[in-house]
Image (cartoon, rainbow, N blue to C red):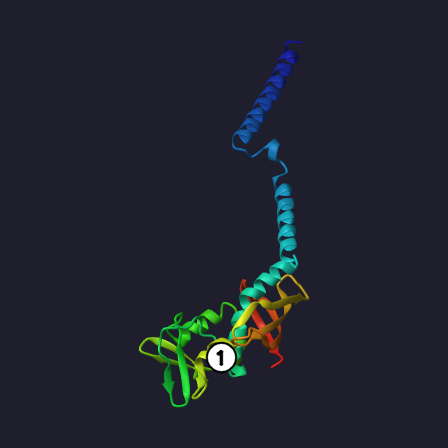
Amino acid sequence: MGKRKKRKSNVGAIIMIIVIVLLSLFVYLLATKRIDFNNKNDDLVEDNTNIDNNKNNNDKNDKTISKEEAITISKEKMPVMISLANQKRGLYGYCGEFDEDADFLTIGNDTYDLSSEFKSVSEVKKYLKESISSELINEYFDNNKYQEKDGKLYCMVAHKGVDLAYLRNENMINNGNTKYDVLNLGNDSFDVEVVISYYSVGDNTPSNLLTISSKIEKIDGKYVVTKYSDNV
C-alpha cells in the first residue's frame, strides 16, 4: 500500500510540474506579446482596412469632376490657349502683359511690342506648358513671331503701316461677354465650348464672335488643353 501511495504522489508531482511549465510558458507569451487577446484579429482587421482604403481611393479617383470645377479650370486655361492660337489668326501670340511705356521694335516690315512678363522664348514656352499640351504648343507656337534682344523679349504685333494703338485694343476680350459651357464631364477630362465677343474701339459694340471647341485633360497631375479648334 505504501509503494502505491508513493507512485500516486510521483504522478501528482509530475502533473504539477507540467502545469507550472505551461503556466510559465503562457505568462512568457503574454509578456512578449506573442499572444494578444485584444488584437487577435489584427491581420483580418488590417486586411479589411486596406480593402476600405482602396475602395475609398478608387471612389475618389472615379469621382466625376463637377461642372463648376470644370468652368473654373476652363477660365484659367483657355485664355492662355486662345492667346497662343491668335498667331494663326494673324495676331500676336502669347506674350503676357505688354510694357505700355516701351518703344516698339521695328525690324523690316514687322513691328514688335515689349513683353513686361517674359525675358525669353524659353520662359514663354515653360509658362504655356502649365496650361497647354506640348503637342498644341508645337502646333501653334511660332518662333518667328518673337525677337530676343538685350535680355528682353519682343512679340510681333503688326506689319508696317498698321495703326498700332488700334491693334492693341481692337481684339481685347470683354470678359463679361465670354461664355463657357462644359460637356462630357469625366474624372480626368471634359470638353469645353467658349464663345467670345470681341469689341471694337470707341463704340464698344461686338465686332466678331469667336467660337472655340476644346478638350481639357488631367496629365501628370495638372489640367491642360489637349485639343483646340475655332471658327476662324
Q: Residue at x 57, y 75 (%)?
A: 198
Quadrant including the N terminus: top right
Q: Quadrant of residue 205?
A: bottom right
Instruction: Give residue 66's quadrant in the image.
Output: bottom right
Residue at the image point whose x is 62% and y is 68% from the top: 179
Q: Position of residue 130 (x, y in %)?
A: 49, 67
Q: Going by the picture, which residue comes out furthest to the left?
A: 150
Q: Which residue is rendered at x = 52% and y = 68% of the image?
A: 131
Q: Is residue 58 visible?
A: yes
| SS of the residue under disc 1 | loop
Furthest residue toward top: 2
Q: Is residue 188 above or below residue 40?
A: below
Q: Quadrant of the C terminus?
A: bottom right
Furthest residue toward right:
184
Decide if residue 109 is on the left or right side of residue 36: left
Q: Is residue 230 left or right of residue 112?
A: right
Q: Residue at x 58, y 61 (%)?
A: 72
122 w.r.t. 41: above or below: below
Return the residue at label 1.
141
Instruction: Give x and y (percent) for residue 17.
Output: 57, 21
Residue 65 in view: no
Task: Name the residue at the bottom extreme.
Answer: 108
Where residue 172 appears, as percent x and y from the top left, is: 52, 73
Within 10 Å of disc 1 (Cα), the crowding (few <14, some 14-19, many 20+) is: many
Q: Position of residue 178 (x, y in %)?
A: 59, 68
Name the amino acid, label 1.
Phe
111 lies above or below 187: below
